[in-house]
Image (cartoon, rainbow, N blue to C red):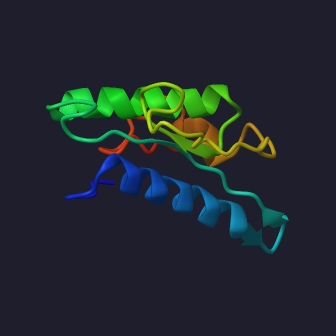
Amino acid sequence: MILPDTDATAAAMVGRRMVQAFRDRPFESDSRGSVPVTASIGVATYQRDGRTGQELIAAADRGLYRVKAAGGHGASGPGEPDGMGEPMATTTKPTPLPKSSPRSTRRGTRPDAAGVRPN
């Protein structure tokens, strides 16, 4: 997701709100009931984290992997401790999906411009 005219603080807030929205609204399935949905989001801002699209994606990717290493379901920037100067990653242990799920076949996909990648 690209957020024009948005600084790091506002981008971090958007990331947190997206993660919270996923946490608050599980997928409701007739056959399986309530299924938790998680998101791992990497945040990067122009000039501070990179000046080209490639640099920004790489910076967001570093934040994304920081969230995944902490257990997933959160948002983080590329720097220390989370790229935003405050705790940003909110993690919970997601319920594992069966290996046959479409979600498990998407591993290794490229993130979009904001570093959002399917878990």
Answer with left or right where residue 75 lies relative to residue 27.
Answer: left
- Count the marks: how many? 0
Q: Quadrant of residue 43?
A: top left
**In this rendering, is residue 59 above or below 13?**
above
Quarter holding the C terminus is: top right
Q: Quadrant of residue 31?
A: bottom right
**In this rendering, is residue 1 above or below 61?**
below
Q: Nearer the viewer, residue 8 or 14?
A: 8
Residue 117 spot, x, y in % from top left: 47, 42
Q: Nearer the viewer, residue 81 or 4?
A: 81
Answer with left or right where residue 95 lies relative to residue 18.
Answer: right
x 45%, y 59%: residue: 14
Answer with left or right where residue 9 lies relative to residue 7.
Answer: right
Q: Residue furthest left?
A: 52
Residue 47 spot, x, y in % from top left: 18, 35
Quarter holding the N terminus is: bottom left
Residue 78 spot, x, y in % from top left: 42, 29
Q: Is residue 26 visible?
A: no
Q: Residue furthest front?
A: 85
Q: Nearer the viewer, residue 110 or 29?
A: 110
x 38%, y 34%: residue: 60
x 28%, y 57%: residue: 3
**In this rendering, is residue 77 above or below 13?**
above
x 80%, y 74%: residue: 30
Residue 55 spot, x, y in % from top left: 23, 27
Q: Is residue 51 visible?
A: yes
